[in-house]
Image (cartoon, rainbow, N blue to C red):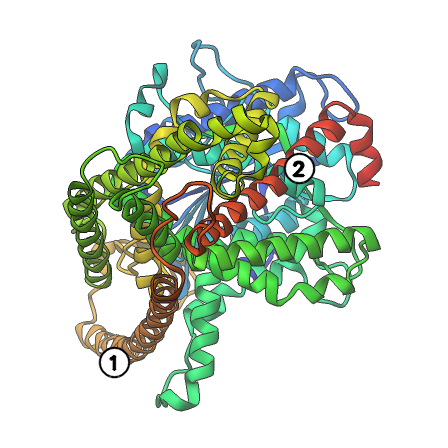
Amino acid sequence: MRYTACTSKPDNFKDDSFNLRQIEFNRRRIEILIAVTMYDEDKTQLSRTLCGIAKNINSLCSREDGTWTKNEGWKKVVVCIVSDGRKKVNKSALEYLSTLGVYQDGIAVESIIDRKVEAHIFEYTTRIPLENNDFAVPIQILFCLKEKNTKKINSHRWIFNAFSPILEPKICVLIDVGTKPGTNAIYNLWETFELHPKVAGACGEIVAMKGRGWYKLLNPIVSAQNFEYKISNILDKPLEHVLGYITVLPGAFSAYRYDALVNTNDYESPLAAYFKDDVYDSNPIASGSFSFIKNTYRNIKSIFAANMYLAEDRILCFELFAKRDRDWLLYYNKFSQAETDVPEEISGFISQRRRWLNGSFFASLYAVFHFNKIWKSNHSRTRKIFFLIQIIYQAFSLLFSWFALGNFYLTFHILCNTLANPQDLIPLPWDPSIGETIFITLRWIYFILVTGQFIFSMSNKPQSSKWANYISLFCFAIIMGYTFFAGSWLTVNGFIYEIIPNIKTNGFIAIFHNDNFWDMVLPLLSTLVMYFIASIIMRDFWHMILCIIQYIFLIPFYVNVLNVYAFCNIHDVSWGNRETDEVDQLDKIVISDEGEIYRVPLYQKNNNNEQQDTLQENKSNHQRNKYNDAKMIEESRKVFRACFVLFWLFSNALLVFYVIAFVGTTLEQSFSQRSRASIYIAVILWSVFGLSAFRFFGCITYIFLYILMPWYSSFSSS
């Protein structure tokens, strides 16, 4: 095992003459660099990921072709584990790595001749025991233990800017600890790059971990996430693959062509844009005197960028696709699967979605605002038109999500209020007074829940308001259940009392002359049918049977809890981690007056009390100035948060007021007549149908061209 105390920043790693074993001793040609990012995960999660990687390397060594020589393929793969912060790393994970021989406690040092150590690098070639007790082929592991917690994007900086320039891999595979790649998942990704020279990035299918016998699906939070993951992999990713631009290659499991990331001309490389967050986050406002008016634009730019880089993988995808003078594509490989753990309790779920929602919202805005960068790329005219279509689709989705808070309430209000009013042809399930009592009660509960959610989101973390969030989930599920019942009652009885009699009188063609059938029944039914057809064609339909009900009941929780918490914490640009620079002190490497280099143990560091007092005083002054600057930054971000939330709430409230005051809050008493409220509901439902139909078209095209006609895939990429 070799240890290197790296005193260099990642960007200067190669220039400062640091090196790695594969190049220094063996000059091995590295085909795949597997980068595993870790924070505080335990040994169970780490071993799950490494065992999955070991199976993939075993699979590579069983192949015998032009690239992979049987039993020698492991020499072309390096597994790089980057842990974000020495203080934050889980002790059990270090014990697991020690068992593998990759890590040894007690040899790391704090500084070398007055130069602070930035990262501790351990290199070792080991074997990982698999489930059948057989040992895998050798695995080259590079373990980088960063001294400080500087977030995941800085870990990627070490991977792309420090280690990759030395190893020069063909592709870099990114995996989060806890994600377990399938047996041939890494090979399938590598094959995508091998077959398609213009592919700069690719991803596989992320599968939610369901446990033995799928017992985790009994948890509605896990079921809803499983449904989301499946629909995304069945509809969203195939559509984006066909258009050539995948908006996000998931950081949990994706791969990039290293040559596409680096700069090949005089223009800015995608990595330069990808790592801008380090600048914004470290110093978004200049130190010294603070003028709010002077720095207002800079503050907005800073918080916009900071939130945008919560979804930094989206920025990298956009920069790759729109790279100047190049025509890189991004692909989706359905046959490359990786299983990842998802939050199983509500506080972790809300914290995760806060990052995802804020990051994706601002990253999507960035792509929409900078769509003109595509004109400087070398893509064909057809590909550019496809990209513009995708940007329009993305902009419409952003607009639709912005007004989701008001639209869901209006849907609830119109359907449930209609059920509380007498119908001429459609009977009510109860006396109108009972329906009105239920509606008024649920409406007040709705107002109280949303108001309470804003209050809790502004002042509490999800962990501290756990039970309040569970109560909100339960109550919103009841509201959704009643809304679903109201819509179903009106639809079913409309068929029974109006449409069927009209069919008997005028024939089956009468159904197509019914306005409300076109406005309500057809878009909902068509959307559901498209989901089923796409799932069946993809041979993955169990989520439509086991998880769709849980997802439907959690829709108001997504809209009224997750969105509210995300926007109310838009000033929080952290990953939800408790970041700190306080770490246990290590030994130092110093040089004596005689030129002798030796190691100073921890207990000898405080001999000169006067010097220590001076250093401590300087450190305190520095921390005080840093604290004052941080407070100013935090206050400015909170002001931005308040203005942003106020504008979001006002625009949704204005929509609700307009519809209730001028459009109406009940459907017509006759199901066959169209009211203004019916038109509003039709706009919402047909919008949902339109978005789903566009995705469904992409799914069918992907299946036809890239699965049934695989030769077209090679033709289209070249």
Residue type of the residue flagged with mark 2: Phe
Q: Are marks 1 and 2 in contact (CB under 8 Å)?
A: no
- Out of 63 and 274, give the one closest to the viewer: 274
Q: Which residue matches tag 2?
A: 697
- Out of 651 and 602, give the one closest to the viewer: 651
For this view, does 167 lie left or right of residue 5? right
Q: Residues within 10 Å of mark 2 (few under 14, many from 20)?
A: some
Is residue 408 among the parts visible in the rendering?
yes
Q: Quadrant of residue 603?
A: bottom left
- Out of 234 and 419, give the one closest to the viewer: 419
Residue 357 percent across, percent down from the top left: 42, 53
Q: Nearer the viewer, mark 1 or mark 2?
A: 2
Residue 102 percent across, percent down from the top left: 43, 33
* 236 to 156, vertically: above or below: above
Q: Which residue matches tag 1?
A: 621
* 112 to 159, vertically: above or below: below
The quadrant the C terminus occupies is top right
Looking at the image, tell me whether mark 1 or mark 2 is earlier in sequence order. Answer: 1
